[in-house]
Image (cartoon, grey):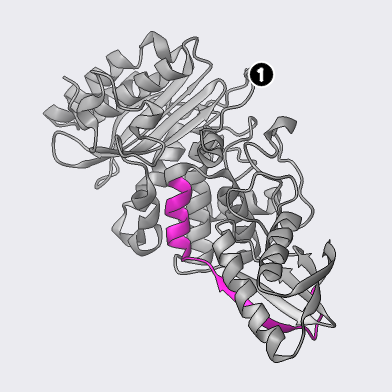
Amino acid sequence: MRPSLRRALVIVATVPLAATMLTAPSAAADPAAAQRSTAELDRDERKMARNLDIRIRDRRLGGRVSGVVIDAASDRRIWGHHAATALMPASNVKLATAVGALTVLGPDHRFTTKVVHGSGTLTLVGGGDHTLTTRDLGALAKDAVASLKRAGVTSVRVRVDGRLFPRPTRATGWKRGYHPGEVTPVRALAVAGHDVMDTSLDAGQVFARLLAQRGVTVTGGVNRGAAGARDVTVGQHRSAKLSRIVRRMLKVSDNDIAESLLRMTALGAGRPATFEGGTAAVRTVLSGTYGVSLANFRMYDGSGLSRATRIPAQTLAEILDLTVDPRHSRTLKHVADGLPVAGQRGATLGPEWGRFDTVASRCAVGKVRAKTGTLTGAIALSGMTKAQDGRWKVFSFVENGSPANPTATKDALDGLAATVNGCWA
């Protein structure tokens, strides 16, 4: 299993599931509201709601499951089951992270990694780009060497400057065992896919080897240090646009990209580049910019690894609903575009992950787009699909503490999404 995909699953060692669930009144607990809502549904929607009422009781889902389906165009709630109950959403948190980053930074934003030279030292300056590759560093090394040769310099020291982010810490709800397999300690400089404890020094070492391959002698190893105020830029790499990075993060559920985006969002909003600064910025975007209700919303990281995070299915659906709202399409459409497609290889809903491959869900292959979420004791699926009436429906299903094995629980959630699509008779 490739490391990036292994981390993408966000599967961790078994620990007791926190019993606390944040609750608020829901349609499921209000028969009168449910009756009024049902009266507003068309025939296909009523059939969907009836089927969901039956299938939400699937034993593979256990007793702590919440869900909601809303009509994307009208925002009408089609169906709900404890939709306001806040559960652990795992990687569905990345939906909130993506909306925050795109709104604060803009879909065309790019991250810049620089190489500067001064006093016989090349400094690799991190810019928060966790998509930086060895090939990108090779291009930086080529530019730097060309500049050095023009100046007649054949020997340099190398240092790394990662001051854009503070010293790495663990988020509330993170296990010690997460580093570096599930997520690397969050630094401003890293080579994509390198699962190491110190990504900054690792990037510097890769850069130093690339310099040596091009005939420049590196002395004294690689050290940390701040770029000098008078250092001259001899190379820079700009990342792909943020819109593309967001799509990549969502399709493979990349934890490292998510945590870096959370910090860059914090900086863009004028806050410290920390878990707290990032999550506060996301909350402000969701509630202040878009009016999303954050009752019972607790977010502690950008990736969804935190076992302390609690978000209602209703809120997750509201976040997704924003991404298909024409008023926000230029900024947020990239979230919807980045959702894995059922049955599509190379993403977390692909057949290599055993998704949408049962009799109950196979009919929805290619028809459902959704973000997966998996932690021990917590599985989620939030996305969208065109229902039988030809209208887009946004859904969110979150399950905590199922007695079934994870594969069986995922199959049950896939079946719920297929029911929304209408292909499950």
Residue visible at 71% across and 37% down?
172
Q: Tell whether position 21 is magenta.
A: no
Q: What's the magenta region?
A: 227-250
Query: Which image quadrant for residue 298?
Result: top right
Location of the C terminus by quadrant is: top left
Point 24% across, 38% down: residue = 366
Please give left or right for residue 71 compared with residue 400 in the image: left
User: Depth check: 29 or 59 in front?
Assistant: 59
Q: In this view, does 308 lie above or below 122?
A: above
Regarding residue 420, the answer to whether it shows in the image is yes
Foreground residue, 399 or 143?
143
Q: Which of 352 and 239 is in front in this view?
A: 352
* Image quarter of residue 393: top left
Which residue is pictured at 72% across the width and 54% down the height?
A: 202
Say which amino acid is labelled 1: Val
Judge left or right: residue 255 versus residue 117.
left
* Residue 149 located left or right of residue 229: left
Q: Mark 1 points at which residue?
A: 15
Q: Is 299 drawn above or below residue 80 in the view shown? A: below
Image coords of residue 237 (percent x, y): 57, 72
Vertical side of 330 occupied by 146: above or below: below
- In percent of width and height, residue 176 lies at 74, 32
**Residue 388 horizontal/vertical position (percent):** 14, 33
